[in-house]
Amino acid sequence: MRIITVLLAVAAVATGCAGTTLQEEAASVEQLRVRVEEELPHDNEAFTQGLELRDGILYEGTGLVGRSTLRAGPPGERPELTAELPRPLFGEGITVVGDRVWQLTWQSGLAIEWDREALTERRRVPYQGEGWGLCHQPEAGRLVMSDGSARLTFRDPRTFAVLGSVTVRADGREYDQLNELECVGGQIYANVWRSDRILRIDPADGSVTAEIDASGLLTAAERDSADVLNGIAAVPGSDQFLLTGKLWPKMFRVTLVPADG
């Protein structure tokens, strides 16, 4: 009888510890929303796949076979430079690395390295699997790539070789459909495909540290002719972001604020 009592007590303690851990884990995922600071025009024919702002120039990668491009120009204005991807390439995520821009392709297994100033192609590097989102962590000396799963893959910014990976999870479950990425201050922001949610992720262990509600940016009429949210660009020197989506007529400069604020 004493043995049974002890075992039950141990089980109760273990259950209580596990419950506390889950509660703490759930509480650690901060809930945020976007507050619109400014609306900017956006090309409603651009099937946006990647967005990045560097030195006042907005770099945008677009998709669809026969319509894929890499563009560069001031935010809210017509691109000053546009490079077209030949068929059958379907452009995906982009990121700026020094004087270059890397651009993924969806199912062709090729990463294209562009000259940042002229948007002329330098080379193509093969990789395995699909390409979705891409961002650069200069402080860690690596690229971060998504492929639509719950896995983020780290790659060498010069050779594109795989350096490692991490699985994104929180509350005991994995978060898949990770798409467009933005690396900011040691954290990764990831658009969740087919949703108005953005996740903030700690790349050290893949834990989700915040969920961001970006719904309500377009009107119901604008939604009818637009596709999903898919474009995250941090505004350097601020706590703001530029957000847009596939075939969206607008781009939004936003600040992240508490969801209940």
Image (cartoon, helix red, strand yellow):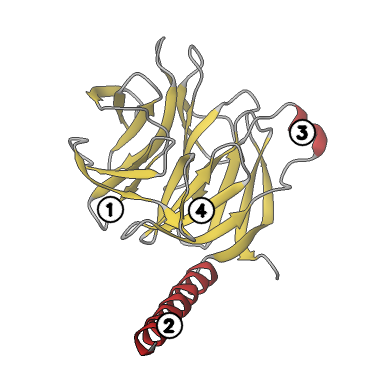
Residue topped by disc 2:
13
Amino acid residing under circle 2? Val
- Residue 18 point in image, percent of width and height: 44, 73
- Residue 257 point in image, percent of width and height: 63, 65
Amino acid residing under circle 4? Leu
Marks 2 and 3, how far apart at CA = 54 Å
Neighbour tally class for label 2: few under 14, some 14-19, many 20 plus, Cα within 10 Å = few
Neighbour tally class for label 1: few under 14, some 14-19, many 20 plus, Cα within 10 Å = some
Question: What kind of element bears circle 3?
Answer: helix
Tell me which label, 3 or 1, sits earlier in the chain.
Answer: 1
Amino acid residing under circle 3? Glu
Residue topped by disc 1:
138
- Residue 70 point in image, percent of width and height: 44, 27
Marks 4 and 1, how far apart at CA = 20 Å
Q: Residue 149 appears in which quarter of the rendering?
A: top left
- Residue at 64% across, 50% down: 214
Tell me which label, 4 or 2, sits earlier in the chain.
Answer: 2
Query: Is 192 in front, or is 220?
Result: 192
Marks 2 and 1, how far apart at CA = 44 Å
Tell me which label, 4 or 1, sits earlier in the chain.
Answer: 1
Question: What kind of element bears circle 2?
Answer: helix
* Above or below for 2 versus 241: below
Nearer to us of marks 2 and 1 is: 2
Query: Is 64 in front, or is 119?
Result: 64
Residue topped by disc 3:
222
Question: What kind of element bears circle 1?
Answer: loop
Farthest residue, direction bottom = 2
- Residue at 25% across, 27% down: 127
